[in-house]
Amino acid sequence: MIKKILVANRGEIAIRVMRSCREMGIKSVAVFSEADRTSMHVRFADEAYFIGPSPSNESYLVIDKIIDVAKRSGADAIHPGYGFLSENAEFTERCKEEGIIFIGPSAHAINTMGDKITARKKMQKASVPVVPGTTEPITDLDDAVETIKKIGLPVMVKASAGGGGKGMRLVTEEKNIRSSVNAAKSEAKASFGDDAVYIEKYIDSPHHIEFQVLCDNHGNAIHLFERECSVQRRHQKVVEETPSPIMTDKVRMEMGAHAVAAAKAVNYSGAGTIEFIVDDDLNYYFLEMNTRLQVEHPITERVVGVDLVKEQIKIANNLPLDLKQEDLFQNGHAIEVRIYAEDPDNNFMPNPGKIKHITEPLGLGVRHDGYVYEGYEIPMHYDPMISKLICWAPTRNEAIDRMKRALYAYKITGVKTSIPFLHRIMDVPAFKEGKYNTHFIQDNSKYLDSTKEPKQKVKDVACIAAFVDYLNKYESTNGKSTESSQSLKPWKQYGRKISINRL
Ligand code: MV4
């Protein structure tokens, strides 16, 4: 049985993993770079080891360094979190060679799902619906033109080694086919060292809905229902919720069964996510599989009542799943928002810096997974995500109200954050009605773009002008009350007339 886990990550996810370790009586080992000397995950762990310079390719991404710390600390297993080495097949192989348990799937599963053309073939064989398109790399431009005419425009040209929005091109006109395929190929070659591209029919205004799966090493596989992740900005998720507002019980059960079949097709082990794109008529298509624990896993944990990290560790210990599909159900509604150190009023520019003050929201139904503290300086070397706020309530409307309450109570100064933007999302009619797709943010800029309402400085000036105007009137009457000022003292009257917050 695993007694000590090296957490090959930083930030909120490192802490999240260590929390489950502690509950299970497992010791945790942190690794940290130069920029992370004062990071919270270092204090949270039972032991911590320095692994070099701040850039991740000189620290968190260096396989030899991670393996070396695992050996020196006597860790039996490595949890990779998300990002960094979490979907690196070479790393999982190295762990195996060194006799260290990698908490995650095999290199085979990572490689098969990592190559989108191979994954599409596998899914077709397993009768999982994929987007209509090609299952072989495009080698001949004339063939490409023929295929596209058959599928019908518009189409997407995608890099086989891509994913998460990288290396994609939309083709809307026949005359652009050749140049788009060529451009996609050279882009794919430059980004991934692999110029294989394939073609899919373009699904307009889709939903992004994903299913959480858990698979043990004894052939048992279950799904833990869906997460609706359509609120995205430049392929970055901003809000996630479960259940999906558009899902029906019938489609949910079908998609869940396909998600389990998809995972089984690659002999999956551990926690994984099957992504689908879904149109407004609830036609759904496999898009890709994420072979790791995901950022948005807490909403599933809250609604299904399962600690996913604990399950990952039990599976890594070769224990059979004790959860049964028929015993699982979705209880209530959970929403997660991601808080970034970014300025939403300045094109989401990263805003690293020192946290002057932080008050984290608390109370019924609120979970806050973070890592920053007062005086902490957010390094510029890593993802600017500060924390995740997860709210649960019996119904979706109550969960939204609770999220608004928690966002209102969440105070951070020193760095700009996306909190005001997230608050605005909760008030967008289409979000409240649950009628949104992946175009939500661009479609609702009139509600979301703060530059369309007066800036705080303008409000301040308006306030001062109103006060000066008042003083002028007061002084012109020699301190005697006028009709409008009546008998109130100036400050009192000012206070009643003008509430800064209401301006
Ligand atoms: C698509 C698509 C429409 N049709 N594929 C973007 C991320 C990557 N995982 C796949 N993506 C898309 N693939 C076809 N055939 C639209 C998108 C897409 C998208 C998908 C999920 C969530 C947000 C998105 C935003 C823009 C485009």
Image (cartoon, grey):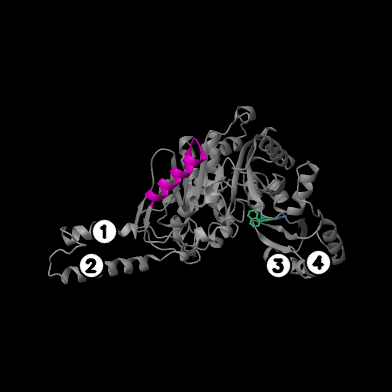
Cα–Cα span, label 4 and label 3: 20 Å
Badge 1 density bin: few <14, some 14–19, many ≥20, Cα 10 Å: few
Q: Image quarter for residue 100?
A: top right
Badge 4 density bin: few <14, some 14–19, many ≥20, Cα 10 Å: few
Mark carried by residue 497:
1
Amino acid type shown at disc 3: Glu
The answer to whether 13 is drawn above or below residue 502 in the figure is: above
Amino acid type shown at disc 4: Glu
Mark 2 lies on residue: 470
Amino acid type shown at disc 2: Tyr
Q: Position of residue 385 (x, y in %)?
A: 49, 56
* Mark whose residue sits in front, 1 or 3: 1
Magenta stretch bounds:
391-410
Mark carried by residue 307:
none
Q: Position of residue 432 (x, y in %)?
A: 52, 47
Mark 3 lies on residue: 187
Cα–Cα span, label 1 and label 3: 60 Å
Mark 4 lies on residue: 174
Name the chief secondary structure element in magenta: helix
Badge 3 density bin: few <14, some 14–19, many ≥20, Cα 10 Å: some
Cα–Cα span, label 1 and label 2: 10 Å
